Image: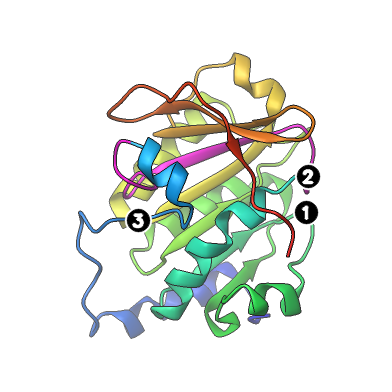
């Protein structure tokens, strides 16, 4: 796994990226899952925006869903940042999924600073994706105002933002460009909201464990 870094150290590395061309503002961001890409208005993740994943519990397949994207970004040399994850990633599994661990970073942030840390990483302009787990009871502290700040930061930094919250937040409105809910038994993925189009009626199978 990439080194565990302090937020200040990660942001200070932004100067390293000044000599490299940034990804085009409208570059496609495929999810790595053909059926889901075909159903989403932008053909993949919403560009430079926040995606909210609503979960009944941790470990229901949410990270397997993202691994193709994280592999693609890290192989392109773009940092992927995990902010205050509930569990540290298993290096062997992530490497087998194609993630370049040299570009995977973990920011250990206390609960009161986790959302701020995620916002700063998104806004930095040097990250490919930022994954955040808001504090409180399954992300209960990530209110509309906090999520809106993350959405604005993702747009400003041209990064992909992913925030993981409890499924109970589904009843509340959200400024996220894309909302995905994992529900049912066995769990299936449902698009609740998508920028630029109508959510598809069908649900999607989650990637099988490798």
Q: Which mark is residue 86?
A: 1
Q: Residues within 10 Å of mark 2 (few under 14, many from 20)?
A: some
In this view, which residue lies farthest toward the top?
A: 171
Q: Which residue is mark 2?
A: 58
* 23 with respect to 90 (left or right): left
The one nearer the camera, 205 or 67, is 205
Q: Is residue 86 above or below residue 172?
A: below
Percent coordinates x, y for residue 59 in the rendering: 78, 49
Residue 54 shown in magenta: yes
Label 3 vs label 1: CA separation?
26 Å
Badge 3 or badge 1: first in the primary sequence: 3
Residue depicted at x 44% and y 77%: 12
* 122 with respect to 205 (left or right): left
Closest to the camera, between mark 2 and mark 1, is: 2
Q: Is residue 106 above or below residue 146?
A: below
Q: Which mark is residue 29?
A: 3
Kindly state the secondary structure of the residue where label 2 is placed: loop
Q: Residues within 10 Å of mark 3 (few under 14, many from 20)?
A: some
Q: Is residue 51 above or below residue 26?
A: above
Q: Is residue 198 in view from this perspective?
A: yes
Badge 2 or badge 1: first in the primary sequence: 2
Residue depicted at x 57% and y 16%: 172
Badge 3 or badge 2: first in the primary sequence: 3
Where residue 66 sits, quadrant-wise, is bottom right
Percent coordinates x, y for residue 105 in the rendering: 59, 73
Kindly state the secondary structure of the residue where label 1 is placed: loop
Residue depicted at x 66% and y 42%: 134
Evaluate if marks 2 and 1 touch, with contact meaning CB atoms under 8 Å apart: yes
Residue 149 shown in magenta: no
Q: Is residue 79 in view from this perspective?
A: no
The magenta stretch is 41-59
């Amino acid at each position: 796994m990439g080194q565990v870094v302090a937020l200040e150290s990660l942001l200070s590395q932004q100067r390293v990226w000044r000599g490299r061309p940034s990804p085009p503002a409208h570059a496609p961001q495929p999810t790595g899952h053909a059926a889901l890409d075909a159903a989403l208005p932008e053909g993949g993740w919403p560009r430079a925006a926040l995606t909210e994943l609503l979960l009944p519990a941790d470990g229901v397949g949410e990270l397997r869903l993202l691994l193709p994207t994280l592999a693609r970004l890290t192989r392109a040399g773009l940092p992927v940042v995990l902010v205050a994850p509930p569990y540290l990633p298993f290096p062997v599994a992530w490497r087998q999924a194609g993630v370049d661990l040299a570009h995977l970073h973990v920011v250990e942030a206390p609960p009161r600073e986790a959302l701020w840390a995620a916002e700063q990483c998104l806004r930095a302009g040097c990250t490919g994706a930022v994954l955040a787990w808001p504090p409180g009871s399954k992300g209960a502290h990530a209110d509309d105002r906090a999520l809106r700040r993350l959405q604005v930061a993702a747009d400003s930094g041209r990064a992909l933002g992913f925030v993981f919250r409890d499924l109970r937040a589904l009843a509340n409105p959200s400024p996220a460009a894309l909302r995905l809910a994992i529900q049912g038994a066995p769990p299936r993925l449902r698009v609740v909201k998508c920028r630029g189009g109508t959510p598809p009626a069908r649900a999607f199978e989650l990637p099988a464990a490798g």
